[in-house]
Amino acid sequence: MINKVISGNEAVALGVKLSRVKVIGIYPITPQTYIIEELAAMKDKGELDAEVVRVESEHSAMAVVYGAGAAGVRVYTATASQGLLYMHEMVWWVAGSRIPIVMTVGTRAVGAPWNIWNEHTDFMSERDSGWIMAFASTPQEALDLTIQAFRISEDERVFLPMMVGMDGFILSHTKTRVYIPSQEEVDNFLPPRKQPYVLDPEEPVDIGNMFQPIDYMKFRQSIHLAMENSKDVIAEVGKEYERNVIPVGSYLTLNSSYMLDDAEYAIVSMGAWSLDAMQVVDELRKEGVKVGLYRIRYVRPWDEEDIKKQLGDKQGILVLDRSVSFGRGGHLYLELKSTLPEANIKGVVSGLGGVSVGKDAISLLTRKFIEEVKSGKVKSEWFYPSEVEEVELRNPRFVK
């Protein structure tokens, strides 16, 4: 194991290389383009033994890895925003065919209007497609989850594709220290791909053919059961990865908790701004406010049991969303409200289209939320960080 200062995109590319992927379908779209450029460069230098297939669209990129995955080889692709929407049909075909595939989504706003900056709408739009969905909060986690994703998706109890999200630009382009496992360590962790149903001229099978209604429904239920099974697989894989590959992460559970045991209030978040939320927790703890953080790492499967265990006794729960279901609210807020219908939950939609939401903004939101809980007037909202500046003008020490 070595450590280097690299970006999230570089970390993912190294994770794909170390996983000995054999077919990569590529089509560029900001902010994930550097991943596939790096993989293509590795191929040209002789560092990567894989077919890198340049295609005419994101739909074709997924079609390429779908075909190769159905033939039984390890495959990978990456996309973002409009590109993921263009893939949408094939995303569902892959899951419905139970083909293990790993994809990175460098999250980015969806037009119109045109926008290249970060939000989680593209990623969250696929949560009903049958893919396992993890979201990184650091470049280190982006690398770790990429390697783990191949092991999880190829497990015989699962056989489902898996996507790993990371915040566009905030993680994809920001450089930080990342611990990189050796090829030997990854080889010992990730066995060669095995799949009992493959396209083979010598033993013909049908994949994705016409089913009778009752059989179709049973097959859809099998996807649901596989998704449920993946909870145990994720925990097992995370434990082995932490023990034998990189001992610097924490993957023993699907999601992550920070100072929640004695907390009266909880912040719930996903992705890079979770680190800002951790700083807010530290700040408020110094002031005697018992608040903790619950970070969503897996959107699918949804760990309802752990959420109830960790958050069920809190006086108030503040949920931060970088995506929204129009007319309803933030996606994570809706999931939490469904899981804990009696809980005192406030949903905040913010950070869309690259709007910057930092520690001061989260601090303001948390303080405001705690006051709302005490007054019994909790109300979900859309939040614009300009409100931080207005408060700072009235009381400069409030958000310091």
Image: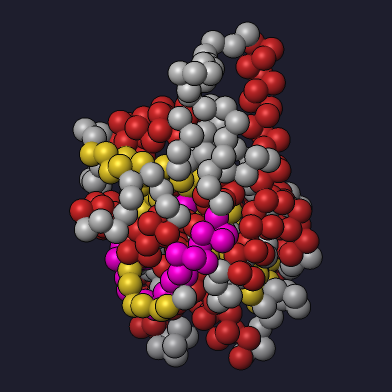
Q: Quadrant of the C terminus?
A: bottom left
296 versus 299 height, above or below: below
Q: Position of residue 350 (x, y in %)?
A: 43, 59
In the depicted view, which residue is nearer to us: 29 or 381? 29
Q: Is residue 163 visible?
A: yes
Instruction: Tell me which residue sits at (45%, 18%) in the image.
Output: 201
Residue farthest top in this picture: 212
Instruction: Tell me which residue sits at (33%, 46%) in the image.
Output: 50
The segment highlighted magenta reads 164-190
- Choose top left, top right, bottom left or bottom right for residue 391: bottom left
142 versus 332 height, above or below: below
In the image: residue 27, left or right of residue 391? left
Give yes or no for residue 75 being in the magenta stretch. no
Instruction: Tell me which residue sits at (69%, 12%) in the image.
Output: 214
Query: What's the coloring here?
Result: secondary structure
Q: Position of residue 153 (x, y in %)?
A: 56, 44
In the depicted view, which residue is nearer to us: 130 or 358? 130
